[in-house]
Image (spheres, rainbow, N blue to C red):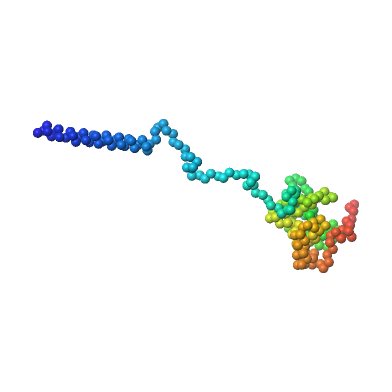
Amino acid sequence: PRMNRRRSKQPKSLAALLLTAILGLIAAYFQGFTKPSSDEKPKRPSPVESTKPTPPSVDPKRDRPTESIPTDDASAEVIKGFASHVKDGDSFVLQTGNEEKDVRLWGIDAPEGNTRQPYAGEARDFARQLYQRKNVTIVVHDRDQYGRIVGEVFLADRTSVNEQIIDAGWAWHFRRHAAEKTSFADAQARAQQAERGLWKDSDPIPPWEWRRDHPPRPKN
């Protein structure tokens, strides 16, 4: 009877061993998919898989900010600088680096200070308050007989200094040199209508007539 009991246990032990072996093989099979081999190097993520956004390509010529100064002539000479000193209502000293240049405002004519024309002081003071010691951009129209730059002057916000002085009533629209500048003519009409600046005088003398009748005294 004892021998029979031992023999009856053998089939059960063999089945258990078989099951264990099969489970081990299955486990080894699936581990081959989940674990990289020791010889395999980890792959870097492709650009598509990367979570960082790719910066857009930049064309320095296309994306460079452009400054838009109102001018009808795209080929006009443009000068940038610092208005270091306003001499009178229509002229000033421009500083560019270590160089200084005299500038005459184009298309306007303000009362003459060197011959004591009425309102010359007020025109100069207004101009100083408007743009002295500020960065300016000049659209050059000409050079005069004294070698001065003649141009329209703009502030950083694109305000025309020339037009502002006319509109405030401290200069005339100089039609002889800028007849085509209708915005200057409109500015003078507004100043006259509102009696601003020198237009509070019923009959102010234009500077070109004042210069003719009051030539500057020669310097000793």
Asked where in the image residue 166 lies, by quadrant, the reply is: bottom right
Asked where in the image residue 61 lies, by quadrant, the reply is: top right
Asked where in the image residue 16 lies, by quadrant, the reply is: top left
Q: Residue furthest left?
A: 1
- Which residue lies at the image location 76% right of the left edge and 46% below the top edge? 99
On the question of residue 121 being in view, the answer is: no
Residue 113 in percent (x, y) is at 83, 58
- Which residue lies at the image location 14% right of the left edge and 32% below the top edge? 7
On the question of residue 38 being in view, the answer is: yes
- Which residue lies at the image location 36% right of the left edge and 35% below the top edge? 32
- Which residue lies at the image location 40% right of the left edge and 32% below the top edge? 38
Of residue 68 and residue 117, the one placed in the foreground of this image is 68
Residue 170 in percent (x, y) is at 78, 61
Q: Say how many tags the image has.
A: 0
79 in relation to 1, above or below? below
139 in relation to 111, above or below? above
Residue 133 in percent (x, y) is at 73, 53
Residue 194 in percent (x, y) is at 75, 67
178 in relation to 34, above or below? below
**In the rendered view of the protein, which quadrant contains the N terminus?**
top left
Residue 66 as seen in the image, left or right of residue 26: right
Residue 9 as seen in the image, left or right of residue 211: left
